[in-house]
Amino acid sequence: MSETGHGADPRTARSLRLPRATAPAPAAAVTPPTRRGVLAAGAGAGAAALLGATGAATAAPAPVPAAAPAPVPAAVPAAADPGAAVPTPPDLAPYASYWFPGSLPSGTPDPGIVWRSLLDWSPESDPDLAHNTATVPLAPRFTPVPAHPGARAGQARISSLVSFAPTAGNPSQGSPTADYYALTHWAYLDELVFWGGSAGEGIVLAPNAPVVDAAHRNGVPVLGNVFLPPVAYGGDLRWTRDLVQRDALGRFPVAGKLVQVARTYGFDGWFVNAETDGGDSALATRMREFLRALRAAGAPHGLRITWYDAMNSTGRVGWQGALNSLNQEFFEDRAGRVADSVFVDFRWTAQSLAASGALAGRLGRSRYELWAAVDTESNGWDSAVRWDAIVPRDRDHVVSYGFYRPEWTRNHLTDRSPGAFHRADDRFWTGESLDPARPAPGALWRAPATVVADRSTVTALPFACAFNTGHGERWYEGGEVTSEAPWNHLGLQDRLPGRRWAVDTAGERPAVTLDFARAWRGGSSLLVAGRLTAPAVVGLHGTRIPLPATTVLELVHASEAGTVGVEVGVATREPSAPGGPVPYTWRKPETTGGAGWRTSRIRISSPPGTTAYGLAVRITPGGNTPVSWRLGALSLHNTTARRRPASPGVLTVTASAQANGRASLRLAWQRSPGAVRHYEVSRVLPDGTRRFLGGTCGAALHLPAVERAAGERAAVFEVRAVDELYALSGPSATTLAWT
């Protein structure tokens, strides 16, 4: 695949790969290298320098045997002073799993890396299984009428290859920093590839649970990565042969393991990238047979395969920048489908993409099963992209496309605060105008919101959104801070509005942002600020929710400057055409509460069979001064009596280690019966104060460094189940005696 930096031309540069790790610097000081940065032969920590040092998980862990050296220092939890130079107990943190297909490299791994063979893995022998298993099912989704007249449904789709953290030392369930690529624009994605792997760490990489849970909540499949590196980057052809080996019965044992891993961990398939050169046509035939076996074993379980345009039918690596006669057999052969899609290398041209789409059609396949690579690793929205070759404005889209490393929106920043990141990420996905319905004229960057139709999974009651992005500088419950520690965990992310931000006003347009200075629940809220000279409508979620006569909609909001009137809009039909106005019906809710957070509530009395197609708020200024209005939560539910979720089963300390008044421990509990959104773990201090420590969608959590309180004989921990409306169950509790 192509490279950036050093003046490389994407049409002639080589290989999609990760650089050799360098010693990690503090997160704020790291300048992420491009994949051309350093040769990765015998790579140590692979992508360790890409995102900076993140520390061990605070909200949960992943797999490293106890005897292995810790990839990163143990993280400091909410109860501790992050700056205190206090020795920490031995690291019990789990990390996302990575392997070699069969044989291991010669020599010994660098510190913090554990070499494992996939053939030796089994669920029964995986000590970190509970921490690495995603639990949110892949949600079905629908396509609302697009907000932008040029955004199209049923044509080009978008894949995204993202490196969230290093291959080794990638926390299973989040970490104690807000500096994280907290992707929220799932509405424009059709596939996410959990990118990573290197010759010095492992070349088969399983996604961590928070990414899968967040993606699934928004209807996006997630693929693990099989990366056979170029020889110059430490690749060894024996790993390719290991991957495609047959057993005595003619079966492909590694294919069986890949299916077992995906099913056990709960993700959706594999991205296969064979870039190790030196093969022959017999090896290419074996690779095609392996892909067919992998797909046949995975298809009954909904697993998919994306093939990267590298190895061709000669067995050599020859990036085509096209689907053509040299690589089509890895997509479709005479017996039928081999891979579900192909990621076309950067060498594509307008002519090669047009020919690729035509060939896909002749093979009986959709041209939109081809992803044309778009490299954004180095230049983000300033990348030179020949958009008309992929998604022309004046005719049907040619093929789909795939972003390589869109986490540039975080990596290029000097200010990596959550607010700065989301402002950059919104611009990448929505465009300079930050309004999908009103793009900036003449913009060179063709933002996804102006090209593809957004999707939504909001189809049933109850539904709630606290505008939590999955990371933050502190944790809030009911508007109160219950942890001062920064954090990230994508599994705790809400289903956020897909269109950010569609604003309709006859006056000045206010700024609309996800803000981290204050929240009702989680780490963020929706902030509308500026001088309002006319009512402003802020579009929220696209929905398809059947509305019973007992439906209630509630807002939790606060006015911080100026005075505003607030109305709620519910659309019971869709716009007549893309870009058309959403036909909201406006209702003024009853509001309770005084200063600070207030609750507004309306009953939606609708005829039987009514469906809500969209939600919005309308803010009317009460004077001429600038306003600052914050939306902390939105919920839509049935008024019929309901119970809070059942408490989790027995809470247990499954492993612990202590040193110098600090403890590292693992907790596990039995899942609550009934529907549960996620679980939250708190510490109860001697004065009765509850402090949030972390959350997870699973039933296990690692706490890296709990600090002993003065005079405390035993630390007390509680876990609660949280439902879709954020109602908390009663606690299950346990203690850890201090030694």
Image: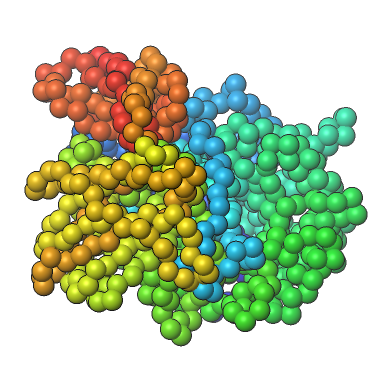
Q: Quadrant of residue 477?
A: top left
Question: Does residue 556 appear in the picture of this structure?
Answer: no
Labels in figure, total: 0
Q: Which image quadrant: the N terminus? A: bottom right
> Residue 497, how many percent across, how many down?
40, 55
Q: Quadrant of residue 711?
A: top left
Looking at this view, is 710 or 667 the one in front? 667
In the rendered image, the residue lying farthest to the right is 334
Q: Which image quadrant: the C terminus? A: top left
Task: Note whether 13 is above or below 229 in the view shown.
Answer: below
| Residue 645 horizontal side relative to residue 235, left or right | left
Looking at this view, is 340 or 175 the one in front? 340
Looking at this view, is 478 or 344 the one in front? 478
> Residue 317, how many percent across, how many down?
76, 62
Task: Note whether 495 is above or below 58 in the view shown.
Answer: below
> Residue 381, how many percent across, how many down?
46, 73
Its colouring scheme is rainbow
Task: Note whether 6 is above or below 113 in the view shown.
Answer: below
At x 16% / y 61%, what residue is drawn?
564
Question: Does residue 342 appear in the picture of this structure?
Answer: yes
Q: Quadrant of residue 239?
A: top right
At x 87% / y 55%, what residue is drawn?
333
In the rendered image, the residue lying farthest to the bottom is 442
In the rendered image, the residue lying farthest to the front is 607
At x 19% / y 74%, what residue is drawn?
533
At x 49% / y 27%, what residue is drawn?
130
| Residue 21 horizontal side relative to residue 275, left or right | left
> Residue 529, how many percent across, how many down?
21, 65
| Residue 108 horizontal side relative to residue 91, left or right | right
